Image (cartoon, rainbow, N blue to C red):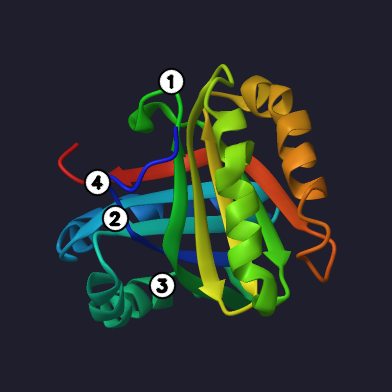
Amino acid sequence: MTTAGQGPSNFRFTAFDFDPTKYDAMISSFDTAKDRIKDIPDLLNVRVVRTLENRMMVMSGYRSSDALDAATGAYSSIFADFAQYIVGEPLVRAGERVARVIGEVPNNDIKYMRFVRVVIDPTKYDAMMSYLNGGVLDSFKDIAGLSRVFITRNSEDHIFSAAGYIDKTSADAAAETMQNAVAGMAEYITEEPLIREGELVWLYQFNV
């Protein structure tokens, strides 16, 4: 169901390309950085997803927008240590959660994620949210293997969806529901949606 309950209210997304020959070393560096990550106040989780052979998406969830802003310095410092693995400049976006769906799978059991970025006409934002909350998001709640769908507004015209599943099979089974939801947004969006997905390769979870 859709809900505004507890959990992260704000998210930071960092997409970057990396040298695949350094993949194992990079993952080890995430483990090394874990103690520093634990020291960031109100950082509730970090998920690292390999969306292509040479691309990662890092999704970090915070308890509030103030916590996200306060963590920017520490976040940048930690990420600077990954420069030796990164090719080009990371793309960083942050936003507030505007909707959420909770599925049957516990949050800690997410193993596969699908990300969808849409560019919208900002004058149609309220109409789009009415469309999503009018039953579209509820259509996800009974998908077998779904854990969470988070929708964030990362800028006036950028909406980002992050969906977590127990495995790729469940994500593939949900593809039609996702495509139908995106198709119904055609009158609100101004560009073709960008879809990235992949396996979860590293996780930090507060108090776990």
Q: Residue at x 55, y 41 (%)?
A: 163
Q: Quadrant of the image for the C terminus?
A: top left
Quarter holding residue 61: bottom left
| Horizontal and vertical percent position of residue 171 | 65, 29
Tell us which disc is closer to us: 3 or 4: 4
The residue indicated by pointer 1 is 104
Quick check: can you spot residue 189?
yes
Look at 20% across and 46% down and name the residue there: 206
Q: Earlier in the sequence, mark 3 or mark 2?
A: 2
Q: Do residues under tags 4 and 1 come within 8 Å of each other at their CB atoms?
A: no
Q: Which disc number belongs to residue 32?
A: 2
The CA span between labels 3 and 2 is 12 Å
Q: Left or right: 172 with respect to 104?
A: right
Circle 1: residue type:
Glu
Determine contact: label 3, label 4, CB under 8 Å.
no
Q: What residue is shown with label 4?
A: 6
Nearer the observer: mark 3 or 2; the answer is 3
Give the CA distance from mark 1 to mark 3: 33 Å
In the image, taking residue 116 as reference, residue 163 lies left or right, namely left
Q: Which residue is mark 3?
A: 79
Q: Residue at x 76, y 65 (%)?
A: 188
Dot 1: element: loop
Q: Is residue 35 left or right of residue 137?
A: left
Above-or-below relation of 123 to 6: below
